[in-house]
Image (cartoon, rainbow, N blue to C red):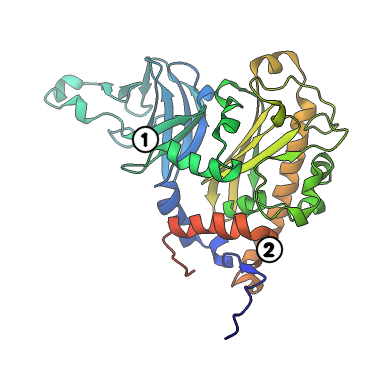
Amino acid sequence: MTTAPPPVFLPTLPGRYYTDQDVFDAEQRSIFSRQWVYACRAQDVPAPGRFVRVTVGAENVLVVRGHDGVLRAFLNVCRHRGATLCAAESGEVGRSIRCPYHAWSYRLDGSLRSAPNWSTMAAADKADLGLNPVHLAEFHGLVWVSLADRPPPLADHLWAQLDYRLGADRAKFERYRLADLVAGHRTDYTVAANWKIIQENFQECYHCATIHPELVDTIPQFRDISRLPGYVADGYAFADGKASFSVTGQALLPPLPGLTEADERRYYGMVLRPNCFLSLLPDHVIVHRFQPVAPDLTTVTCEWLFPPETVAGYDVADTVELFHLVNEQDFAATEACQPNMKSRSYARGGILVPLEQEIIGRWYYDWYRAAMDLGEHL
């Protein structure tokens, strides 16, 4: 009996998974309303009364630091008549969170503090009228929230992915000391593409030699696609003559404290599902946050993180510019794909070549199918 050879190609998701509103709504329910979602960095909320507002699934969530120094998350909804408590993306609420509609106020731990004319409601129990809490956990300075009733430990969720990327060498990740870094630059992008198209792009380098000339000049392995079937646990080496990951290759910034000789002139990139992309470099770290807005629209926040003394004493523009170029090139490519997801040519999807299959076809799609409870059928 002859065994048929394995197929050369694997299928992508069908086109409707990148365009259909019902699919997008199901993703919000099954992924973004159930799993841990990257919200911000702890240093974005540095002091009591400071807050960050994020969209998680269909909910509007506040991350706020209390007077006790603890970070907490709540639905950004007044318990009285449903008004939005904080409309700004970030800011300062002072000693309490005050509703702009009827002036109900809440302590920073979410409990109800006061309401106008409360004497007529004295029989009510304030303990039942606090803000609705949202699960929050911090991982090396990255703040994640979950709308699930009982989410699994955040560390289990993230270490499983980091172990896959870094060959289970947890000390390697910990050496970068993300919690000690500060933002030297931030850019917000609006991308007219489905969030999965962007993440698929970030997880393969089949396109790198075509659209990223600056990147492949810095990391020659990204040009030699025959050697990139999956993640390289030891990272990707800089080109000879490139002292740094920057446009000129010569931006000499202080190395991150705690790194070893094996970490020098190396790049590691990884998607942390469902909405984070992390890049580890010898002198900085880059963190992307993906926010699905619509089936064909995603906002992306990219932050370049450095030690505080680097931000205070050095010009980081040359370093920032390289991945900004990469971002613009990637986002233009994904925007060129998005309209054709509705083409009858893509009704059954496209194909993944062998170099794309390990990370996208198996690692990423297996997670997506399980999260969406699709089994083997699409």
Amino acid type for the residue under numbered disc 2: Pro
Find disc 2 in the rendering and name its residue.
354
Q: Is residue 83 left or right of residue 339?
A: left
Find disc 1 in the rendering and name its residue.
135
Foreground disc of the pair 2, 1: 2
* Whether residue 69 is situated above or below residue 363 in the rendered picture: above
Amino acid type for the residue under numbered disc 1: His
> Where does residue 287 sit, x and y in percent of width and height?
61, 35
Residue found 85% across the figure and 27% down from its top:
250
Q: Element under label 2?
A: helix
> Decide: marks 2, 1 in contact (CB < 8 A)?
no
> Where does residue 38 sit, x and y in percent of width and height?
50, 38
> Where does residue 204 sit, x and y in percent of width and height?
68, 52
What count of labels does the image hold? 2
User: Alpha carbon of mark 2 to alpha carbon of mark 1: how far?
Assistant: 39 Å
Residue found 69% across the figure and 59% down from its top:
355
* Whether residue 162 is situated above or below residue 282 in the rendered picture: below
User: 50 or 264, which is in the foreground?
Assistant: 264
* Whether residue 66 is situated above or below residue 13 in the rendered picture: above
User: 217 or 229, which is in the foreground?
Assistant: 229
Q: Element under label 1?
A: strand
